[in-house]
Image (cartoon, rainbow, N blue to C red):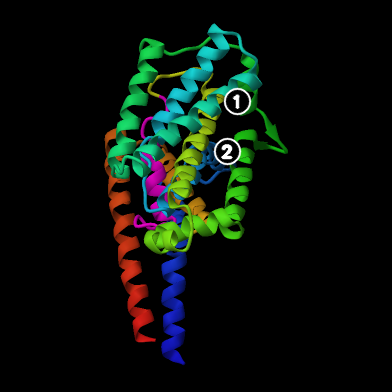
């Protein structure tokens, strides 16, 4: 009985240790900076992680299939500058601009998916190529200069709120609810887990593996496009460098949330905790006066620790199953 109790305790720690890490991090930064544990700071963190959080949803779906998407930051950046150009240079209505940009971002995602599925390129190389190309495209179409001076109505979304909760945070919450449900209760979710868990078995059971992977990369691009539009609304300026680093923050948050790099494992609701850890870490370091270089170093260490924790916890779980 005691052995079973100990196993249950270990499983709880493995599954929810990340929540303890988040609470510890909040306590440490609250002690280090007297201004950290305030409502205004918490809302700042939520607004900051809301954009990368949208990217995390798409990254989760790709990683569940055993892939990875390094292009999400560039898709967000090129989507932001494309929307700014459509609004300023072509005076397109806001709804038309958003629809066109999201169609383009979906295409960018499908290009990555095509390279992975049809050209049999490793996901890392395929999405790195798309990332580099799109970042170059963002600089080409803007001439390396920020695009601003378009209608202020576009900025009203990010500046607005409902019952004190910023619109962009509400949008992120809605998207997480939709995709948590989709992954848990729909055929798409089962197929994503199936393809990541055992691709060959999924193929033999009649699942269209290529179609599922294309869908995952397409949705990742589409969600990165939404993130780019929200970013543009927040900053009121289409920066060609916008979205830089989003891919690493997203991958770290997703791995922290327990999604396996090998695919087939992980829950989207735990990715929320991983996303909050990244937000708390970034905001806490800024409020403690830690410079950008140290911040990059710390984020890199966190990614290494997250992957190490994921692999160690997987080994412990497998051992526990064997000894049962």
Instruction: Pick the residue in front: 324 or 256.
Output: 324
In screen coordinates, is 211 left or right of 302?
right
- Residue 18 visible? The answer is no
- The Cα–Cα distance between marks 1 and 2, rounded to whole angstroms, is 33 Å
Mark 1 closeness class: few <14, some 14–19, many ≥20 residues within 10 Å? few
Q: Secondary structure at mark 1?
A: helix
Residue 313: where, in percent of width, then height? 35, 68
Residue positioned 37% across, 25% down in the render: 134
User: In this image, 44 relative to 166: left or right?
Assistant: left
Q: Foreground: 100 or 291?
A: 100
Q: Residue at x 64, y 44 (%)?
A: 174
Q: Tag 2 or tag 1, which sits nearer the N-term? A: 2
Towards the viewer: 29 or 128? 128
Residue bearing mark 1:
99
Q: Badge 2 is on which residue?
A: 40
Q: Nearer the viewer, mark 1 or mark 2?
A: 1
In which quadrant will I find the C terminus? Answer: bottom left
Q: Residue 101, position in %: x, y? A: 53, 24
């Amino acid at each position: 009985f005691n052995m079973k109790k100990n196993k249950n305790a270990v499983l709880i720690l493995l599954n929810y240790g990340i929540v303890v890490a988040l609470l510890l991090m909040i306590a440490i930064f609250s002690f280090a900076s007297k201004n950290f544990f305030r409502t205004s700071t918490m809302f700042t963190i939520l607004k900051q992680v809301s954009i990368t959080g949208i990217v995390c949803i798409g990254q989760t779906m790709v990683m569940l299939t055993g892939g990875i998407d390094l292009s999400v930051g560039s898709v967000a950046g090129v989507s932001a500058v494309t929307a700014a150009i459509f609004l300023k240079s072509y005076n397109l209505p806001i709804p038309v601009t958003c629809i066109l940009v999201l169609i383009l971002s979906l295409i960018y995602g499908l290009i990555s998916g095509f390279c992975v599925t049809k050209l049999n390129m490793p996901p890392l190389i395929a999405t790195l190529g798309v990332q580099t190309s799109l970042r170059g495209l963002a600089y080409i179409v803007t001439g390396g200069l920020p695009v601003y001076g378009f209608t202020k109505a576009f900025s009203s979304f990010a500046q607005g709120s409902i019952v004190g909760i910023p619109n962009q945070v509400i949008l992120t919450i809605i998207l997480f609810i939709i995709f948590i449900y989709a992954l848990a209760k729909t055929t798409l979710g089962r197929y994503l887990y199936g393809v990541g868990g055992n691709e060959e078995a999924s193929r033999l059971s009649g699942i269209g593996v290529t179609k599922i992977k294309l869908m995952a990369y397409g949705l990742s691009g589409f969600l990165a496009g939404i993130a780019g539009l929200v970013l543009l609304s927040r900053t009121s300026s289409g920066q060609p460098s916008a979205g830089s680093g989003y891919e690493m923050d997203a991958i770290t948050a997703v791995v922290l949330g327990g999604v396996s790099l090998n695919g087939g494992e992980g829950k989207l609701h735990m990715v929320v905790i991983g996303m909050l850890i990244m937000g708390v870490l970034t905001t806490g370091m800024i409020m403690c006066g830690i410079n950008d270089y140290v911040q990059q170093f710390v984020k890199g260490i966190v990614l290494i620790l997250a992957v190490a924790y994921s692999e160690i916890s997987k080994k412990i779980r497998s051992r526990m199953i064997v000894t049962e």
